[in-house]
Amino acid sequence: MIRPLSLVPILLAVTTLTACGTAQGSTETQELRYQGSVGNVTFPELAEELGYLKPVKLKWIGNTTSGPQDIQTAATGQSDFGGAFNGAVVKLVAAKAPIKAVVSYYGSDQYSYQGFFTLQDSPIHTARDLIGKKVGMNTLGAHAEAVLKEYLKRGGLTPAEIKQVELVAVPPVSTEQSLRQKQIDVAVLGGLLRDKALARGGLKALFKDVDLFGNFSAGTYVLTDRFIKQNPNTARKFVEATAKAIQWTQTHSRDEVVAEFKKIIAKRGRNEDATAVGFWKSSGVATKGGVIEPQEFQRWITWLEDAGEIKPGQVKAQDVYTNAYNPFASGGSR
């Protein structure tokens, strides 16, 4: 697993984007290379299916293993865009990667959230009870780790005590089983895996990420500065289309969204199980069309500074993102 909060310096690969045609009168790429997610549909994929991305097309190059890996792939020019937890984006910017966050694509609300669960009879009730315990999550150094450490900090634990809480990377499909077999003491669960685990019973929620922050957008898609400079119209089309796809899910019924997702999975023919999208409940994105708000980065910049991961003032929120290409920015984000 990749630990994005302790990223090693990245040597950015210099890549040449092949012009596959013209976009709005200039020679720009009309093909966007990207990594997908098994059994799930990304907003750019939805945008393409809805016709918002035309004349630009997507080119699937494989599936990502995590958000941090996805944005590193974009930063090194192996793909044209990637998405990850905002704290991981900040850390990559601190490592001098010339990237820019352009649209929020996931977050947490009452329907879509990450919960920290224990067994029903567990003696763990508070943050202090986690000292010396194991917490299992999908990847270290991303959303779950940052939320957990914020919970521990608010619970009054000192930095030394926080280090005594052991974080364990566990494949999402194995997290519930690891908890029930008592290989870990707390399991971080979300989406389909959370709902199925709760339906089986025997678990209780210690806390949820929304308990700490309310509804919030947590991750963004990024483009490199180089890509934006060489393909300004394509970059705008990508953001506009993705924002419209997000807004489409925010204004259509759950059944309509699920039906569209299932259609996309069937059409792309990757031999996938579409069960997960049937449990889709909301985008989780807190703003209309994924407009980025300053606090969505400032929260994690401050957290990383306090944790000693980056130096105070090393990264400024306004330098990490732009709403310049999002059509919903000028009309208000809510």
Image (tube, rainbow, N blue to C red):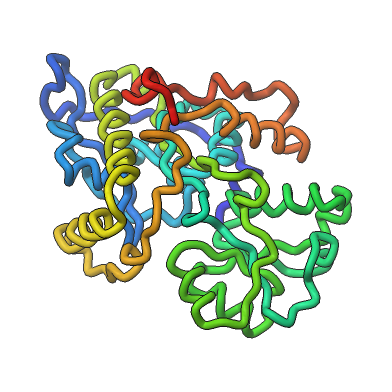
Q: Nearer the viewer, residue 252 or 59?
A: 252
- The answer to whether residue 34 shows anywhere in this view is no
- Residue at x 16%, y 15% (from the top left corner): 26
Q: Is residue 42 above or below residue 12?
A: below
Q: Is residue 293 above or below residue 152?
A: above
Q: So how many labels did they put on this image?
A: 0
Q: Position of residue 164 (x, y in %)?
A: 83, 60
**Quadrant placement of the N terminus:** bottom right
Q: Nearer the viewer, residue 45 or 33?
A: 45
- Residue at x 59%, y 39% (from the top left corner): 87
Q: Position of residue 276 (x, y in %)?
A: 35, 67
Q: Position of residue 101 (x, y in %)?
A: 45, 30
- Residue at x 56%, y 53% (from the top left corner): 2
User: In the picture provided, is 198 more to the left or to the right than 59?
Assistant: right
User: In the picture provided, is 27 more to the left or to the right than 119?
Assistant: left
Q: Position of residue 27 (x, y in %)?
A: 16, 18
Quarter of the image holding residue 238?
A: top left
Q: Name the residue furthest top.
A: 25
Quarter of the image holding residue 103?
A: top left
User: In the picture provided, is 272 more to the left or to the right than 110?
Assistant: left
- Residue at x 30%, y 43% (from the top left corner): 251
